[in-house]
Image (cartoon, coloured by chain):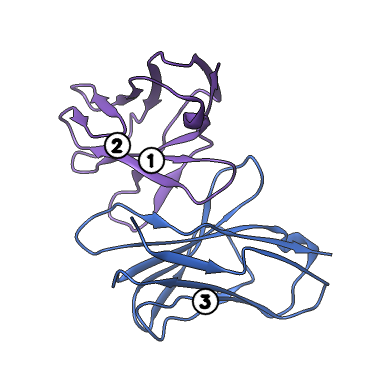
Amino acid sequence: EADIYQTPRYLVIGTGKKITLECSQTMGHDKMYWYQQDPGMELHLIHYSYGVNSTEKGDLSSESTVSRIRTEHFPLTLESARPSHTSQYLCASRPTDTDTQYFGPGTRLTVL
Amino acid sequence: DAKTTQPPSMDCAEGRAANLPCNHSTISGNEYVYWYRQIHSQGPQYIIHGLKNNETNEMASLIITEDRKSSTLILPHATLRDTAVYYCIVKDPGTYKYIFGTGTRLKVLA
């Protein structure tokens, strides 16, 4: 069973607020991912981390930023939330020696 | 870019085998095919993966054609709890990117 956690699970906020979505894993995985998924749609990679202090943007343009100061922690930040940011955000991790990803439960964000 | 194609939806009677096809004609020689499923918009759950040989685990079987251009995920005795969206995934060769398509929405009927 994979140990990857996301908080909050649900968040409703107003436009212009700064928010941070938390993602933590206790498996010691080097690789971590953030995906964005609208209802009924496919997952889109928005951020990727190879390891501590190493992050890259994914295919889908996103106004969010990420940091990777510790192996187990990969938070995603929106400096000024907008209604267009309303979506589900999924965090995943994997060890270096396999391509199998383990996903967290997701954060469903609604920006009013 | 690597890409997969799956039927948008399928129905299966409870207790019967569910066979979910996937085309991945652009897959490169050393990339695996992965299958995940997503229930009620929770985080996707890993099911199985394979390179060229057929694979089986406690959840499912994976049949990969000899030319590796397609595969089929088999749930041998589908239950109502198997109702989910099933994704066939390949990695973009030489990158860290996993290509998630729109998946197949499997509905298991009582």
Residue, x 19% and y 37% (percent of image)?
B51
Nearest to the observer: residue A102 or residue A56: A102
Q: Earlier in the sequence, mark 2 or mark 1?
A: 2
Residue occupied by mark 3: A75
**Pointer 2 residue:** B27
Chain B colour is purple
Label 3, label 1: how many angstroms apart (C-alpha)?
25 Å
Which element carries disc 2, helix, strand or loop? Answer: loop
Three-letter code for the amino acid on which mark 2 is drawn: Ile
* Chain given the colour blue: A
Mark 3 vs mark 1: give the one in front: 3
Indicate the quadrant containing the C terminus of chain A: top left, top right, bottom left or bottom right. Answer: bottom right
Closest to the camera, between mark 3 and mark 2, is: 3
Using a 10 Å C-alpha cutoff, classify the residue at mark 3 as few (fewer than 14 neighbours), some (14 to 19) or many (20 or more): some
- Give the amino acid at mark 3: Pro
* Chain for numbered disc 3: A
Report in which chain the residue with disc 2 lies: B
In percent of width and height, residue A81 lies at: 74, 72
Task: Relative to B4, say whether B15 is above or below.
Answer: above
Subunit that carries the residue with mark 1: B
